[in-house]
Amino acid sequence: MNLLLLFRLAWRNVLRNRRRSLVLLVTISFGLWAMLFFAAFIRGWNEDTTQNAIDTLTGHLQVHAPDYLDDPSVDHSMRGPSTELRALLKGPEVLAWDSRVRVPAVVMSERETSGVTLVGIDPGRESKLSFIGHSIKAGRQLKDAQDHGIILGRKLADRLDTELGKRVVVMSQGADHSVCDRGFRVVGIFDADRSSTEMAFVFVGRSTAQSMLKMNDEISEISVKLRDAQRLDGFLAHARRAAPELDVQPWTTLQPMVLAMVALGKAWIWIFYLVMYIAMAFGLINTLLMAVAERTREFGLLQALGMRPRLILEQVLAESSLLLAAGVVLGGLLAAGSLALLHGGIDFSHLAQGAEMWGMSKVIHPTLRAWDLISAVLFIVVLALVASVYPALRAARKVPIEALTRG
Amino acid sequence: MSSGLGLRLARRNLWRNPRRTILTFSAIAFATAILVFMIAFQQGGYRAMIESAIGVFTGHLQVQVAGYHDNPRLSEYFEDASALEARIAKLSGVKAVAARGESYALLSSSSRTHGAAVVGVEPEHEPQLSTLPKSIREGRFLSGNHSDEAVVGMTLAKNLSLSLGDTLTLLGQGNEGSLAAATLTVVGIFQSGEPELDRSTMEMPLGTFQEVFSIPDGAHSIAVRTANLDQVDRVTRSISAALSGRPKLVVLPWQDLLEGLKQGITLDATVGWFLYAVLVFVVTFSILNTFLMAVLERTHEFGVLLALGTRPNYLGRVVMTESIMLLLLGLLVGLGLGCAVTLLTGQHGLAFSGSEELLTRWNLPSRIYPRLNLLSLTVGPAVIFVVTFIAALFPLVRIRRLRPVDAMKAV
């Protein structure tokens, strides 16, 4: 029997009991839709979270003095990039980089006091590097590294009961161990995805910070964003060679929580796949068993006429493949449709603090990657064919006489 | 025909095709068991998150000046802390109380300076409310209410290069613009398990705090512990009633104090319900075919019965009895299986090796104990019963449409 005939027979059998086939089709396509949708949700969550972590000052990699990460104080500052490192940073692989001052500090308004991280930046370099380049919602961005103004997060400004144009005092420890303080005028207010970010950072010009903290031209960190995140490992090796005396770390070690979340999300996808698959398998096996049982006579006759059991097995498998294929296409279309509807993302703003607790962004953009689609489809198809083997074997194993005399 | 006969017929029909019955029944049992276990696991996890989050510092509820929680300011304190505290402690359902003053100040060691949250606590009451005094890794907790002592978080101590016995200088703003300054001795270093507290918190005796920040007998919050989580609503109401003469004070249960935690749980539960709904739907469609087949393959038989004068209603009842027997059996076994797995894992808890850091951040202990309660035992089975029951009704429509003569012609 050729393949075409095999599938034509199988197709007729699928159509023989339309209602039953339809129920199975709904089961498979809905199941696949749920799997793809969930995978896209987790993937979107992971990617939004990763992007957020990278944008919140981390970059793809950072360079520090050896002890800075352990104890982020002004004592562990370093000189600006060496000629060698600077050459690498100016290379084609780098999208943007900035050298920053980043030290713990206290900010005081006339009324309130709060602990923050004081970040001295070169605003021009941050525009493509971190969120602060595009998050000023009131007032203005710092003009340059010499700017005398300060930018606060919205939540911090509220907490300090201060506003644009008012003055705040920043206190921190200087390089000479004295307590340095300096007044700044609030020139800008930024909004961030997370309120903890709005509370955590205040931004001033780098040179201003250096002179306030008596650091000369020393800096705390260099943050780098690459054009292609995939080439991080190679670039990391170059950077370590260019600056052997410094601590060069990728975002994956700087933000271990994000990495752990991604791993956890992936584990959940597979657990869900498995549960969904088992639920679908019951329906698939049962339906195929029925289809086989009601054709016992037919199979017996075919065998008595000399058809080999193998062909009967193939016929049942062909039937289940057809149903599967239809289910996969329909499920895929459903997933594509529902994801297109959710193009703007799923908004969890009403649960913003809860999202923050789980390390999520407020808005999740479900994203279906080719690999997720392929793995879900392969997972269903392979396992469903395995599940069809049992009914198919039962059909093929019938002894002709017994089958013919029944019913 | 009597209903006893109907039952017997239904039972026999069920075993006419044992393989199909077993598969259908397994599908129902599988879904039920998963729902029972997952909901128990969620409930256990949430409970652990709440207990551990409120146990470290917050308490089950707090009395504060209205507005202080959203915008904590030194000036928003109440002036009769000790009297108020004594009054609340006497109310029924209140297990422990502790008054606290909170502010922010610059802390300096001999070589370093850092900003930190400064909390004034009563050395006598605090250990009954917060696990922080028990998490002292070096040294001891504060001794007297007016001593010049301080305990600092592990990370903060490291960042300030402080060790036991070192002197710590506090500099901040006191009430009404006064200067708050003090020199304290570090007597203990704590590691609470909450990175944020360990990095940015210093505790000192409340009496000393009141002097330094110029708020005589003042406090910003009175934290209250109740017997357990279920008591929180009742105790919140009774304290509110007792404080009705003080319109400026509010009683905030943990849900209001730790809004992020509450929302986080809502969010997780939402995703959970979505997944459960999907599972129930797929399982229902998986077994819908079985119900359909139970009627289809007996078209001929039903035709004969109808021709003999059996009423369609009776046939419907027999088929329905069949489906419900199958359903209940699946539900019972699923429930038993779900309970067994839950109790088994509940005994020793489920450990998540390798994700301790994540779990700490979410206030989860490294082991989660799935928790059987009314919710986890009933919601899953009830939903599955209702939905599959509706699915079982579909074949009945077909029986009503059967015409005896045509039906008998069917094979």
Image: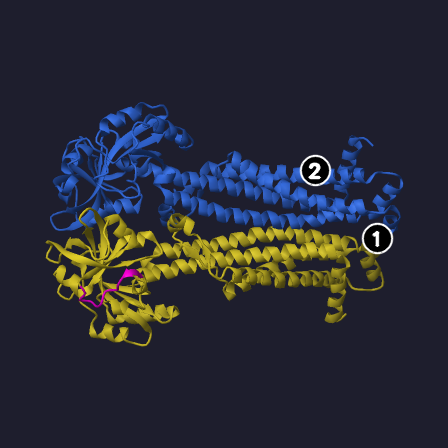
Chain colours: A yellow, B blue
Q: Is residue B411 above or below residue B339?
A: below
Q: In front: A321, or B243?
A: B243
Question: Is residue B20 shown above or below A339?
Answer: above
Q: Is residue B258 magenta?
A: no
Indicate whether A302 appears above or below B299.
below
Question: Regarding mark 1 in the picture, which secondary structure is present there?
Answer: helix
Residue A121 sits in quarter: bottom left
Where residue A239 appears, x then y in whole percent?
28, 70
Q: Nearer the viewer, mark 1 or mark 2?
A: 2
| Amino acid type at mark 1 | Glu
Are circles 1 and 2 on residues that touch, CB within 8 Å? no
Q: Is residue B311 left or right of residue A85?
A: right
Place of residue A78 in the rendered image (x, y in percent of width and height, measured from the top left):
18, 64
Horizontal placement of A128 versus B203: left or right? right
* Dot 1 alpha-carbon crowd within 10 angstroms: few under 14, some 14 to 19, many 20 or more: few
- The answer to whether residue B368 shows anywhere in this view is no
Residue B234, how many percent across, how many down?
A: 40, 29
The residue indicated by pointer 1 is A402
Q: Within the image, what quadrant is residue B144 found in?
A: top left
Q: Mark 2 belongs to which amino acid?
A: Met
Q: Which residues are magenta?
A: A136-147
The residue under label 2 is B325
Mostly what secondary structure, the magenta segment?
loop
As drawn, the label of residue A194 is none
- How many discs mark residues in the rendered view? 2
Q: Is residue A171 visible?
A: yes
